[in-house]
Image: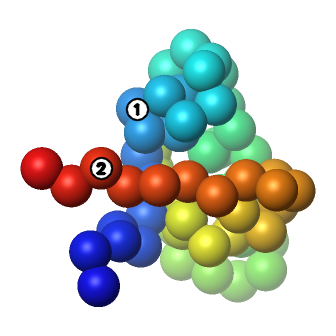
Amino acid sequence: MNEKSFITAAELAAALSISKGHAYKIIHRLNEELGQKGYLTFSGRVPRKYLEERCYGLEVEVQVG
């Protein structure tokens, strides 16, 4: 299993072709949602599975190397 559990702002920015600053805003929003549900969150990263659930049709590939 080579897929990382969390996606960073840099990876999200590249996957969605958006700025890194905007990616941080998206991650912050998703982490707020997770926090309200009682989950532990980490600044600057969000669970890949949750991101894919919230962004219809998004499948983020990881580049290992």
Q: Residues within 10 Å of mark 1 (few under 14, many from 20)?
A: some
Q: Residue at x 62, y 45 (%)?
A: 27
Q: Nearer the viewer, residue 43 or 16?
A: 16
Which residue is tagged 2? 63
Q: Tell me the kind of residue under disc 2.
A: Gln
Q: Is residue 14 above or below residue 30?
A: above
Q: Secondary structure at mark 1?
A: helix
Q: Position of residue 60 (x, y in %)?
A: 55, 54
Q: Position of residue 8 (x, y in %)?
A: 42, 46
Residue 56 has which mark? Answer: none
For this view, does 53 lie left or right of residue 26? right
Q: Residue at x 12, y 50 (%)?
A: 65
For the N terminus, give its image quadrant.
Answer: bottom left
For this view, does 20 lie left or right of residue 51? left
Which residue is tagged 1? 10
For this view, does 35 lie left or right of residue 12? right
Q: Nearer the viewer, residue 38 or 15?
A: 15
Q: Quadrant of residue 17?
A: top right
Q: Residue at x 43, y 64 (%)?
A: 6
Q: Secondary structure at mark 2?
A: loop
Q: Residue at x 79, y 80 (%)?
A: 37
Q: Is residue 12 visible?
A: yes
Q: Tell me the kind of residue under disc 1.
A: Ala
For this view, does 44 lie left or right of residue 39? left
Q: Position of residue 50 (x, y in %)?
A: 68, 70
Q: Is residue 21 visible?
A: no
Q: Is residue 17 above or below residue 63?
A: above
